[in-house]
């Protein structure tokens, strides 16, 4: 397990009782470097959507636990937020909740001369993701997908 994965896993363990206490759920955790700064990003969610108070409550409680445990070697910036409307669907639990929803898929390489696709998420398994585009099913290998996210319709 990489250092990044270790930090994310330990953070998730600390975060689990906190989100339960505040009535939210863990959507995702990322530990990454942007420029010269390290960030620990925690995304929380709940059915009716999170608000600033949810983020503040979780942030304060998590910050106290992280200070107490002190397992992250680098200086970092803690951010707690909603995953947003056009949220990336990174994990199977994200895909499961989004079945029947409209999604956007961007691929690493063109498929039929196109790298962006939009359709209804129909199904997924360990190796593939299937969407319906204009009543036709299109199957993508997960390895081909750079990102899949909920589509934003305005």
Image (cartoon, rainbow, N blue to C red):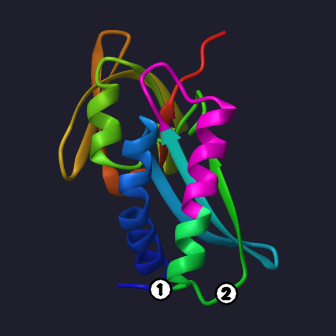
> Residue drawn 29% across and 24% down?
99
The residue sitting at the right extreme is 36
Between 2 and 62, the one nearer to me in the picture: 62
> Residue drawn 69% across and 34% down?
52
Boundaries of the magenta span = 45-62
Between 124 and 110, the one nearer to me in the picture: 124
The residue sitting at the left extreme is 125
Instruction: Judge whether residue 51 is colored magenta.
Output: yes
Q: Position of residue 138 (x, y in %)?
A: 30, 29
Q: Quadrant of the N terminus?
A: bottom left
Q: Is residue 99 above or below residue 21?
A: above
Instruction: Judge whether residue 19 is colored magenta.
Output: no
Between 62 and 116, the one nearer to me in the picture: 62
Q: Can you identify the residue that label 2 sits on?
A: 74
Between 71 and 125, the one nearer to me in the picture: 71
Dot 2 crowding, Cα within 10 Å, few <14, some 14–19, many 20+: few
Q: Position of residue 77 (x, y in %)?
A: 73, 68
Q: Is residue 67 above or below residue 115?
A: below
Q: Can you identify the residue that label 1 sits on?
A: 3
Say whether marks 1 and 2 touch (CB < 8 Å).
Answer: no
Q: Is residue 121 left or right of residue 106?
A: left
Main SS of the magenta part reads helix
Q: Position of residue 137 (x, y in %)?
A: 26, 22
Mark 1–mark 2 distance (CA, rounded to whole Å): 11 Å
Number of marks in the rendered image = 2
| Tag nearer the camera, 1 or 2 | 2
Q: Position of residue 37 (x, y in %)?
A: 78, 75
Q: Is residue 105 something one can see in this rendering?
A: no
Q: Quadrant of the C terminus?
A: top right
Q: Is residue 53 left or right of residue 46?
A: right
Say whether disc 1 or disc 2 marks the residue closer to the N-terminus: 1
Would you identify the image quadrant in which residue 153 lies? top right
């Amino acid at each position: 397990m990489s250092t990044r994965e270790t930090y994310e896993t330990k953070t998730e363990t600390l975060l689990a009782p906190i989100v339960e206490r505040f009535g939210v759920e863990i959507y995702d955790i990322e530990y990454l470097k942007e420029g010269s700064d390290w960030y620990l990003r925690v995304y929380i969610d709940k059915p009716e959507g999170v608000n600033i108070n949810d983020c503040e409550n979780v942030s304060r409680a998590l910050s106290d636990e992280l200070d107490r445990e002190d397992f992250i070697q680098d200086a970092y910036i803690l951010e707690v937020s909603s995953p947003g409307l056009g949220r990336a669907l990174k994990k199977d639990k994200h895909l499961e909740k989004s079945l029947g929803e409209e999604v956007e898929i961007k691929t690493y390489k063109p498929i039929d001369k196109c790298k962006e696709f939009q359709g209804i998420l129909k199904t997924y398994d360990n190796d593939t993701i299937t969407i319906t585009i204009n009543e036709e099913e299109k199957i993508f290998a997960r390895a081909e997908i750079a990102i899949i996210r909920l589509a934003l319709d305005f």
